[in-house]
């Protein structure tokens, strides 16, 4: 599978769901590696849905959000729907501030 120190992947389910769990701080130092790992997983596993569990992220910066948008776009180009699930408070706040809730398939908290 696509190994990365910040991303843990589960096996693809029979209905095409792949869950990737992120852990720790997602910032300039780690964002490109995570982006590349998620994009490779979307293209190389046969999944149709990639759910990125961000419940254990303790920090995310704007560069990392951009990297996740890039991973989402790469997944979409491969016919895979990438969605962020269970955002931690820091992730939820960053997504609200940037207005990216719809991009990541999250309900907007108006």
Image: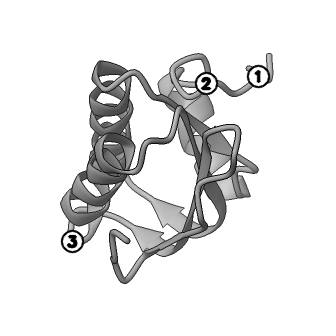
Q: Is residue 104 above or below residue 67?
A: above
**Pointer 1 and pointer 2: residues touching (CB < 8 Å)?**
yes
The residue that label 3 is drawn on is 29
Of callouts 1 and 2, the N-terminal one? 2
**Mark carried by residue 101:** 2
- Residue at 45% across / 28% down in the picture? 80
Name which quarter of the figure residue 102 lies in.
top right
Instruction: Classify 10 Å Cα crowding around label 2: few (below 14), some (14-19), many (20 and above).
Output: some
- Along the line of sight, which residue is nearer the eye, 72 or 26? 72
Q: Is residue 31 above or below residue 58?
A: above
Name which quarter of the figure residue 29 lies in.
bottom left
- Along the line of sight, which residue is nearer the eye, 29 or 32? 32
Quick one: SS at disc 2?
A: loop
Q: How far apart, in angstroms, are the residues tagged by discs 3 and 1?
A: 29 Å
The residue that label 1 is drawn on is 107
Q: Is residue 77 above or below residue 53?
A: above
- Along the line of sight, which residue is nearer the eye, 100 or 97? 100
Quick one: SS at disc 1?
A: loop
């Amino acid at each position: 599978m696509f190994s990365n120190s910040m991303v843990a992947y589960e096996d693809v389910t029979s209905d095409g769901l792949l869950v990737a769990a992120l852990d720790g701080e997602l910032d300039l130092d780690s964002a490109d590696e995570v982006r590349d790992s998620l994009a490779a997983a979307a293209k190389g596993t046969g999944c149709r849905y990639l759910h990125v569990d961000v419940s254990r992220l303790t920090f995310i910066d704007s560069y990392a959000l951009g990297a996740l948008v890039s991973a989402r776009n790469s997944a979409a180009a491969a016919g895979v729907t990438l969605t962020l699930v269970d955002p931690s408070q820091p992730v939820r706040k960053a997504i609200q501030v940037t207005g990216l809730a719809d991009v990541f398939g999250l309900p907007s908290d108006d």
